[in-house]
Image (tube, rainbow, N blue to C red):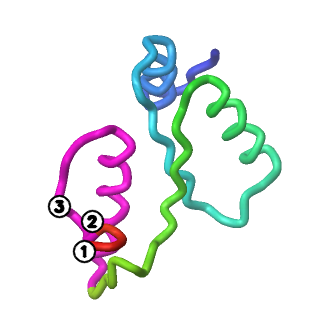
Amino acid sequence: GYSADLIGRAAEIMLRLGRPLVLMPRETPLSLPAIENMRLAKLAGAIILPPVMAYYAQPQTVDDVTDFFVGKVLDVLGLEHNLYRRWGE
């Protein structure tokens, strides 16, 4: 309910309007407050999608890794893409 900056405000509006909000927490190890905040965000309707690399796509470059992460976000938003090779393809 409190937004200290524009990013927080945009996130709050997405949840309020029932639109998809994808959060990609990347700092590890996770602190208990961070885990609790992610739990609350999930309860509010956010999608928690840590950027965890799957090696079945056989990344060769940093761009391949970036494409994988972006592709995962597009997947959860239901948008088609060809950024990485899916399992079994």
* Residue labelled with disc 2: 67
Kindly state the secondary structure of the residue where label 3 is placed. loop
Q: CA distance from mark 3 to mark 2?
A: 9 Å
| Residue lying at 31% horizontally and 67% vertically, measured from the top left | 86
SS majority, magenta: helix
Kindly state the secondary structure of the residue where label 1 is placed. helix
* Residue labelled with disc 1: 63
Q: Nearer the viewer, mark 3 or mark 2?
A: 3
Confirm whether the magenta stretch covers residue 70.
Answer: yes
* 79 vs 5, nearest the viewer: 79
Quadrant into which the C terminus falls: bottom left
Residue 77 percent across, percent down from the top left = 34, 38
Few, some or many residues within 10 Å of mark 1 (<14, 14–19, 20+)? few
Establish if 65 lies above or below 33: below
Q: Looking at numbered disc 3 in the image, what kind of residue is underneath it?
A: Asn
Establish if 17 lies above or below 23: above
Quadrant into which the N terminus falls: top right
For the record, the magenta segment spans 61-85
Q: Residue 88: which quarter of the image?
A: bottom left
Q: Looking at numbered disc 1 in the image, what kind of residue is underneath it?
A: Asp
